[in-house]
Image (cartoon, rainbow, N blue to C red):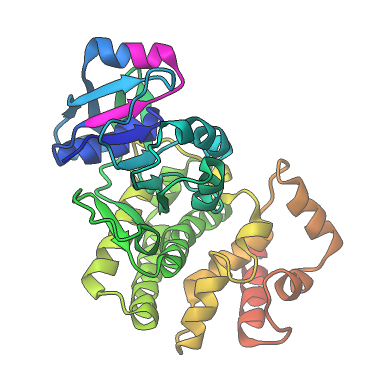
Amino acid sequence: MNKIVVVGAGKTGRGFIGRLLSEDNAEIMFIDKDKALVDELNAKKEFTVRFFGGVREDFKVTNFSAYTWEDADLGDSDLILVSVGGQNLKDVGASLSPLLKDDKHYTIITCENSSKPSVVLGEAIGNKDISVSESTVFCTTTDDGLNIDSENYPYLQCNADLLGGYEMKIKGIRPIDNFGNFLTRKLYTYNAASCVIAYLGYIKGYSDYAKAANDPEILELLDKNYEVTNKVLCKEFGYEEADQAEFAALSKEKFCSKVIVDTVARNARDPERKLAKGERIMGPMVMIYENGIMPEVLIKTAAAALLYDNEKDVTWREMKAAKSKGEILTELCGLEAGSELYEAILAECAKIEK
């Protein structure tokens, strides 16, 4: 197997992507613009990935070299993973393009949760023989010097349709057909569950996200929502029940972890975005309802989101001042006035307010 290039040796690049590659005994070439970081990686020749909660033994990453753009030579590498923030993709494309040989095809995967990253990077690279795919990163990482503290997430899921026929040899990288459906699956499983915890946690007075996630009443509702969501997603998209159950369980493990520091406010911010039609609350709610099941947990979550208030959420405060709850449900959430879901959410709001 040729060296695999990882552009961006930050927390995700070395602590998640680097760990997945190293678990499969791949040789890694890190490229990073931070010369001090590159020098430290080359001097120490190893770093350790520790796992939140001690769920598995520490893992050492050793089989790598590191370069700045000025010193990088891709050699025979044909797989490049780009782990930088979306705002840096254009600069990466401009720096990467001169390193790509004109007589060789390269497969590139963006490893960042941003809008259309494969398009942005591909356009920045320009007229080269490339296939640019994209992935979604679920793994939470924090750094401690070179060493990383990480969630034990086992996969990087990427868009199979954009790989250009590349045969993936790394077990931890999963090409996914119909990637748009997969992103919907993620939105309706992970992001919806996060909203259940955040908004119901707010109503119960929590500020610490992990404490809200481990509240017995919220946990019971969370499990109830996973159960119905899993059932309907499998029916709608044909996912295997065991695979969807594992997918949901990984999200629950992440959200309930007491060693990942997070806040209710961070997860609840921008309610106007999260309540929008087709988004993480209304999307799965309508899908579940259309399958003949009353989405009780998401109705409670939508009501709690309507009542959510934080002085930092200026846009949301302005919307609530200008519109009634009913108007928000029709104009933002896309519900018909007087419909069953519309009335159920308003009734839940009244119940909470009492």
Q: Residue furthest bottom?
A: 292
Does the image show residue 264? no
Q: Is residue 258 above or below residue 44?
A: below
Compare residues 272 and 178 and report the one nearer the observer: 178
The location of residue 42, given as percent across then percent down, is 27, 14
Quadrant in the rendering for residue 319:
bottom right
- Viewer-closest of 98 and 221: 98
* Residue 239 shows in this picture: yes
Vertical comparison of 56 with 134: above or below: above
Q: Is residue 38 magenta?
A: yes
In the shown orientation, is residue 311 left or right of residue 191?
right
Image quadrant for the N terminus?
top left
| Image quadrant where one finds the C terminus | bottom right
Residue ranking furthest to the front:
103
Which of the two residues, 350 or 114, is positioned nearer the viewer here?
Answer: 114
Residue at the location (28% across, 46% down)?
A: 153
Q: Where is residue 278 shown, x and y percent of the image?
A: 58, 71
Quadrant housing residue 271: bottom right
In depth, the one of 109 and 351 nearer the eye is 109
User: Which residue is drawn at the image coordinates 27% and 37% (left, top)?
Assistant: 77
Q: Quadrant of residue 36?
A: top left
Task: Tally the numbered discs.
Answer: 0
Range shown magenta: 28-39
Residue 75, position in %: x, y?
A: 28, 30
Q: Position of residue 199 (x, y in %)?
A: 55, 56
Q: Is residue 251 above or below residue 17?
A: below
Q: Is residue 294 magenta?
A: no
Query: Is residue 341 depicted above or below 273 in this figure?
Result: below
Q: Which residue corresponds to the image point at 30% horizontal and 40% vertical from the top-left?
A: 151
